[in-house]
């Protein structure tokens, strides 16, 4: 098992896109976190450290990590390397566990580094721009998330991206489909729902990122948002697993 994990870890960092997207992720995190501090009214002090550290839970940050997540299978399917991987590790369950474990380690590493960058941004921010009291701002909406929520949401988003790539065997789909769903498709569905006099409310209440963002923002009127979001992620992962075990390389 450890041999497969080491193999995946080395493969992860041997791909140039991993380094590029990791740097871009940190840059986007710094810009989004620093925006309210440097461009806002420093006399108000409406941002807090908790709000600042919830920045890298935003989808614009996570889409960078999803590129790397999609590579776990998409890169191998694109270049036919999956055959070499399965020749070296014929037990597919080991390959799946190794890739998922390394993805979790990568997301955790980048999240912690992202928090370090946000800490430096906050330390260099104009005096008075961060308040030690109050709620703070969450650029994703709602209340600032707890740090463990940012970590879990980031991993869940990347698992969804990897799962879509496993199902479609298309790296681009793993990146584009979650992003479009979170930023465009669900917004259109909510717009149609508002025009249908509430007839589509049941659909809106079941959407993955509507619930994911409600859970991140601690929306009081969505107590089951976390469970619904988790059901989407687990469901996608199980379908992807079935596809990986049933289809030829």
Image: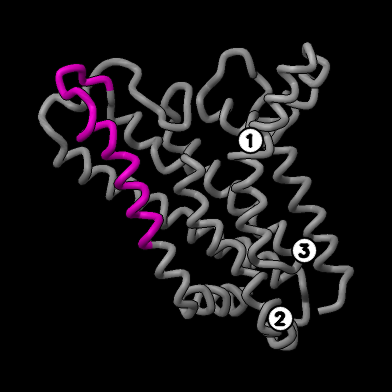
Q: Is residue 26 above or below residue 124?
A: below
**For numbered disc 2, what is the local secondary structure?**
helix
Distance from Cα at disc 3 to Cα at disc 2: 14 Å
Distance from Cα at disc 1 to Cα at disc 2: 31 Å
Using the rendered view, name the quadrant where residue 188 is placed: top right
Circle 3 residue: 168
First along the sequence among labels 3 and 2: 2
* Neighbour tally class for label 1: few under 14, some 14-19, many 20 plus, Cα within 10 Å: many
**For numbered disc 1, what is the local secondary structure?**
helix
First along the sequence among labels 3 and 1: 3
Magenta region: 23-46
The residue at the point 41 percent across, 50 percent down is 111
Q: Nearer the viewer, residue 149 or 130?
A: 130
Distance from Cα at disc 3 to Cα at disc 1: 21 Å
Which corner quadrant holds the C terminus? bottom right
| Residue furthest out toward the left | 127
Q: Position of residue 213 (x, y in %)?
A: 56, 31
Residue 151 belongs to the span the image colors magenta: no
Q: Is residue 90 above or below residue 36?
A: below
Q: Position of residue 154 (x, y in %)?
A: 52, 46
First along the sequence among labels 1 and 2: 2
**For numbered disc 3, what is the local secondary structure?**
helix
Q: Is residue 228 above or below residue 155?
A: above
Q: Nearer the viewer, residue 97 or 114?
A: 114
Q: Is residue 198 above or below residue 192?
A: above
- Helix, strand or loop for the magenta stretch, by majority: helix
Circle 1 residue: 209
The residue at the point 75 percent across, 28 percent down is 206
Circle 2 residue: 82
- In the image, taking residue 124 as reference, residue 194 lies left or right, namely right
Q: Are marks 1 and 2 in contact (CB under 8 Å)?
A: no
């Amino acid at each position: 098992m450890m041999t497969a994990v080491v193999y995946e870890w080395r493969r992860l960092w041997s791909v140039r896109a991993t380094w590029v997207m990791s740097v871009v992720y940190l840059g986007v995190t710094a810009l989004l976190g620093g925006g309210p501090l440097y461009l806002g009214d420093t006399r108000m002090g409406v941002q807090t450290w908790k709000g600042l550290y919830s920045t890298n839970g935003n989808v614009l940050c996570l889409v960078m990590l999803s590129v790397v997540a999609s590579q776990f299978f998409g890169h191998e399917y694109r270049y036919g390397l999956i055959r070499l991987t399965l020749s070296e590790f014929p037990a597919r369950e080991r390959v799946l566990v190794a890739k998922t474990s390394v993805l979790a380690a990568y997301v955790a590493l980048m999240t912690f580094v992202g928090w370090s960058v946000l800490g430096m941004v906050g330390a260099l921010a104009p005096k008075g721009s961060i308040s030690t009291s109050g709620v703070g701002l969450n650029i994703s909406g709602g209340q600032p998330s707890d740090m463990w929520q940012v970590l879990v949401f980031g991993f869940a988003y990347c698992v969804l991206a990897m799962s879509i790539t496993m199902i479609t065997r298309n790296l681009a789909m793993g990146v584009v489909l979650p992003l479009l769903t979170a930023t465009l498709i669900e917004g259109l569905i909510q717009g149609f729902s508002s025009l249908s006099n509430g007839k589509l409310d049941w659909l809106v209440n079941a959407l993955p990122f509507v619930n994911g963002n409600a859970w991140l923002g601690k929306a009081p009127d969505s107590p089951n948002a976390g469970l619904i979001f988790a059901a989407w992620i687990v469901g996608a992962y199980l379908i992807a697993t079935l596809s990986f075990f049933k289809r030829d390389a």
